[in-house]
Amino acid sequence: MRSLKQQILILLLGSLIVLAVCFIVAFGWFMKNRAEDAAFIKAQADLATCEEIMDKTFPGPWHEQNGELYKGPAKISLNNQFVDHLSLLTGDTVTIFLGDTRVATTVRGSSEERAIGTKVSANVAQTVLQNGQTFVGKANVVGQWYETGYVPLRTESGNIIGMFYVGISHDYDQKTINGSLITLGILGLSLTIIVALITWFFLQKFIIHPLHNITLGARDIATGHLTQKIKISGSKEIKELENAFNQMVEQLQSLTSEINKTTCDFENNLVPSEEAIYSPPPPDAIVSNPTLDDTTTVNAAEPPTANAVNTGHFRGQSLPKGLNQATLEHVLKFVQTIERPISAEEVAEGVQLTRVTVRRYLEFLEQCGVLKSDQKYGTVGRPLKLFIPL
């Protein structure tokens, strides 16, 4: 299962990618239309420019002589140097037609030779040669699509005998559009990476890290440490979660205190103290212990010794308030039976008492020298205290 951070990043990056793709498609469509419009405007301007250059270079009317096209006294048919000059000035392909046939052109066919003698498309011939109108639009020029402009060539009497053409290759437009889209794509990718890094930083600082601290606090509660409250910074929702968590810790602390108090009162009422069962002997009296041999005695006025605890002789001894002899012997017997380091929780489960009560008996046995304690450190939470029988 993916983490919350990964899910948010995937959702954000997925949204950015979808948005970027939609934007690029819309921008590409917009650029395509704008590029075509710009090409048609350029074709019209180039037509006017080339017509003016032709009139100044070759003064005189257009006419046909012996199947060749002339302007004034100058022969235009096969005058490829002139159309190359116009193409160099405008950046367009340039063609001069006699009727519907190319007689001078920069357009090249599949064999890379000038397309002299080829015909114009039927729709263009209809518009220009028959209707006498200027054609500006897409046209098929020797198998390739161009944004084109065609104007009729008229004799001195007004008859249409040919056409003049300029064209901008559709591949040129496509390269311009593709270059713009690639630039836009690189820019979009860079912005996506920057947004992803910024999002990761804020997620880590204001969401993931606070949630991690709350998780550690919950693990402390699971291990029995109810004193740990958390202090984190984050958004309004994170602060509300922090407050709810700390309120839960306070309620658990209060509930645990009540349970411990009730348990201690119950045990004190259920099992009478040793002082109520046994009348304390005079201070100077020596009490014989029937479980020892005839030469072994225990002074009732002295505190319990390690030897006495180890052998289980607590009868008649003065125990701390709240402890009783039977429970103490029961706890000691259980610990000695295990014969390994053991925690208060394990002992409490084994002797069927609360952890707080068992811990008091274990700490008393530790003071008497019967047990010793050691700290076990884990990866999370407080160290665990283990009791080891000596």
Image: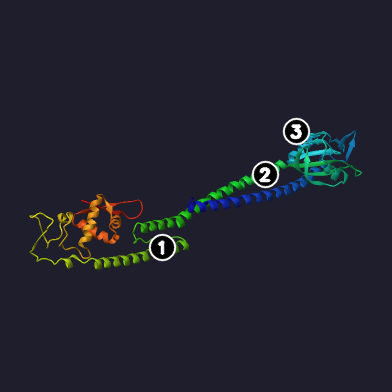
Residue displayed at 85% across by 39% down: 100
Residue carrying label 3: 110
Residue displayed at 80% across by 38% down: 95
233 displayed left or right of 257? right
Please name whichever residue, 206 or 356, is drawn nearer the observer in this view of the structure. Answer: 356
How crowded is the residue under tag 3: few (<14 C-alpha within 10 Å), some, or many (20+)?
A: few
Q: Which mark is residue 176?
A: 2
The alpha-carbon separation of the residues under discs 2 and 1 comes to 60 Å
Of callouts 3 and 2, which one flags the residue occurring earlier in the amino acid sequence?
Answer: 3
Residue carrying label 1: 245
* Residue contact between numbered discs 3 and 1, judged by CB atoms under 8 Å: no
Please name whichever residue, 240 or 264, is drawn nearer the observer in this view of the structure. Answer: 264
How crowded is the residue under tag 1: few (<14 C-alpha within 10 Å), some, or many (20+)?
A: some
Which percent across, then down, holds residue 83? 78, 37
Mark 2: amino acid: Thr
Q: Quadrant of residue 226?
A: bottom left
Tell me the mark number nearer the camera, choosing from 3 and 1. 1
The alpha-carbon separation of the residues under discs 3 and 1 comes to 79 Å
Q: How many marks?
A: 3
Tell me the mark number nearer the camera, choosing from 2 and 1. 1
Q: Quadrant of residue 91?
A: top right
Q: Which residue, as the protein is rendered here, is positioned at the far right?
A: 157
Mark 1: amino acid: Phe
Of callouts 2 and 1, which one flags the residue occurring earlier in the amino acid sequence?
Answer: 2
User: Which element is circle 2 on?
Assistant: helix
Does 267 appear above or below 172?
below
The alpha-carbon separation of the residues under discs 3 and 2 comes to 24 Å
